[in-house]
Image: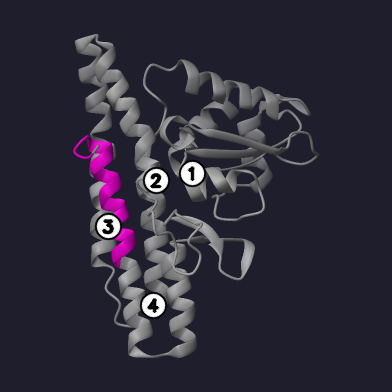
C-alpha cells in the first residue's frame, strides 16, 4: 500500500542545528525546495531569505542540492527500496520550509514535480561516467538515448497541464498526478542491484563499500569497481550489461511520465 500511494517522503533527521540550510532530494523536487526557501526569511539574518543565505554560504549563483544515495538515514527505504520522491533537510528553522513544501504537495492541483531537473542530473552523471570509462570500450549510447527520452517526456508535461485546465475534470488530473508519482518508481528494478538486492533503485544507492558514500548509477559503479579489479573481458561485459539495465529503467520512466505505460 505504501509503495502504491505515497506521494513523497519528507525526511528531517536534524530538525534543529546550527549552520547553513542544507537539502538533498530526488531531482524532481529541486524546484519546489528552492521556491520554498525563497519564501522564508532567515531567522539569523532577517534581511535575507533562506535561499539568499544559501547562495551566500557557498559564494555561488545557483544553489547545489545533494542527492540521496547514502544509507544510514530513514529516507533510504523510501527512495532506494520503494522509489518514492524524497527530500531531506536540516536547518534551525526547517519547520517553515518543511511546512511550505508539505502544503504544496498536499494542495497543488498538479503535483509540483519537475522531471526536467531529473533529466539534467542524469545527463551530468552520464558525462562523469563517460569520462571514467572512455577508454574501456563501453557504449553509453543507450544511456544517453534514454535520458533524452525522459527529457522530452518531461518537457511535454506543461502542455499536459494546459490541456487539463481546459477540460476542467478531476479524472485527468488524477491520472497525471499518478504518472508524476510513479515515474520515480520506474527507476527501480525488482531484482535490485547485483549482490545487493534490497537496493532496488538503479539511479541512487550507497557505494558498495561505504554506506554513507553516494553513487549515481550504483549498479554500473559496482560493475566498474569489479572490472577494474578483475580486468577481464567478462567483467567489462558486465559493465555494459549494467548500462543497459539503467537505460531500460530510464526509458521505462519516460514511458510512465508520458502516459504510455501504466
> Tag 2 or tag 1, which sits nearer the N-term?
1
Name the mark nearer the viewer: 3 or 4: 3
User: Is label 3 or label 1 in front?
Assistant: 3
Proximity of marks 1 and 2: CB atoms separated by less than 8 Å: yes
Residue where numbered disc 2 is placed: 118
Q: Quadrant of residue 131?
A: bottom left
* Residue position for label 1: 26
Q: Nearer the viewer, residue 107 or 72?
A: 72
Mark 2 vs 4, N-terminal side: 2
Please determine whether, in this image, residue 126 is positioned above or below residue 53. Answer: below
Q: Is residue 260 visible?
A: yes
Q: Earlier in the sequence, mark 2 or mark 3?
A: 2
Specify which label sits upstream in the sequence, 3 or 1: 1
- At 30% across and 77% down in the image, what residue appears? 138
The residue positioned farthest toward the top in the image shown: 168
Magenta stretch in the rendered image = 244-261
Image quarter where the N terminus lies is top left
Mark 4 Cα shell of 10 Å, populated few (<14), some (14-19), many (≥20): some
**Mark 3 Cα within 10 Å, few/some/many (few <14, many 20+)?**
some
Using the image, determine if residue 5 lies above or below residue 66.
above
For marks 3 and 4, the one nearer the N-term is 4
Check disc 3 and report the residue beneath it.
Answer: 248
Q: Residues within 10 Å of mark 2 (few under 14, many from 20)?
A: many
Task: Give the residue pinned by disc 4.
Answer: 133
In percent of width and height, residue 20 lies at 72, 40
Task: State how far apart marks 3 and 1 are (Cα).
Answer: 19 Å
Query: In whole angstroms, how far apart are the C-alphas of marks 2 and 3?
Result: 16 Å
- Element under disc 4: helix
Label 4 or label 1, whichever lies nearer to me, is 1
Amino acid at each position: 500500500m505504501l509503495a502504491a500511494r505515497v506521494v513523497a517522503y519528507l525526511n528531517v533527521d536534524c530538525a534543529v542545528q546550527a549552520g547553513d540550510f542544507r537539502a538533498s532530494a530526488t531531482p524532481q523536487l529541486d524546484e519546489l525546495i528552492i521556491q520554498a526557501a525563497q519564501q522564508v526569511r532567515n531567522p539569523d539574518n532577517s534581511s535575507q531569505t533562506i535561499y539568499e543565505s544559501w547562495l551566500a554560504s557557498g559564494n555561488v549563483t545557483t544553489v547545489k542540492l545533494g542527492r540521496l544515495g547514502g544509507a544510514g538515514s530513514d529516507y533510504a527505504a523510501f527512495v532506494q527500496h520503494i522509489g518514492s520522491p524524497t527530500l531531506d533537510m536540516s536547518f534551525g528553522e526547517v519547520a517553515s520550509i518543511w511546512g511550505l513544501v508539505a502544503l504544496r504537495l498536499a494542495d497543488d492541483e498538479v503535483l509540483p514535480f519537475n522531471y526536467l531537473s531529473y533529466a539534467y542530473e542524469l545527463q551530468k552523471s552520464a558525462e562523469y561516467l563517460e569520462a571514467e570509462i572512455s577508454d574501456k570500450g563501453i557504449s553509453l549510447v543507450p544511456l544517453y538515448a534514454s535520458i533524452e527520452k525522459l527529457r522530452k517526456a518531461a518537457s511535454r508535461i506543461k502542455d499536459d497541464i494546459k490541456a487539463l485546465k481546459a477540460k476542467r475534470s478531476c479524472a485527468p488530473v488524477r491520472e497525471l498526478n499518478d504518472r508524476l508519482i510513479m515515474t520515480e518508481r520506474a527507476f527501480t528494478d525488482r531484482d535490485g542491484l547485483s549482490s545487493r538486492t534490497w537496493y532496488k533503485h538503479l539511479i541512487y544507492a550507497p557505494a558498495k563499500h561505504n554506506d554513507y558514500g553516494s553513487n549515481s548509477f550504483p549498479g554500473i559503479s559496482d560493475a566498474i569497481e569489479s572490472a577494474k579489479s578483475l580486468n577481464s573481458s567478462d567483467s567489462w561485459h558486465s559493465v555494459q550489461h549494467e548500462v543497459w539495465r539503467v537505460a531500460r529503467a530510464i526509458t521505462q520512466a519516460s514511458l510512465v511520465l508520458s502516459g504510455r505505460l501504466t
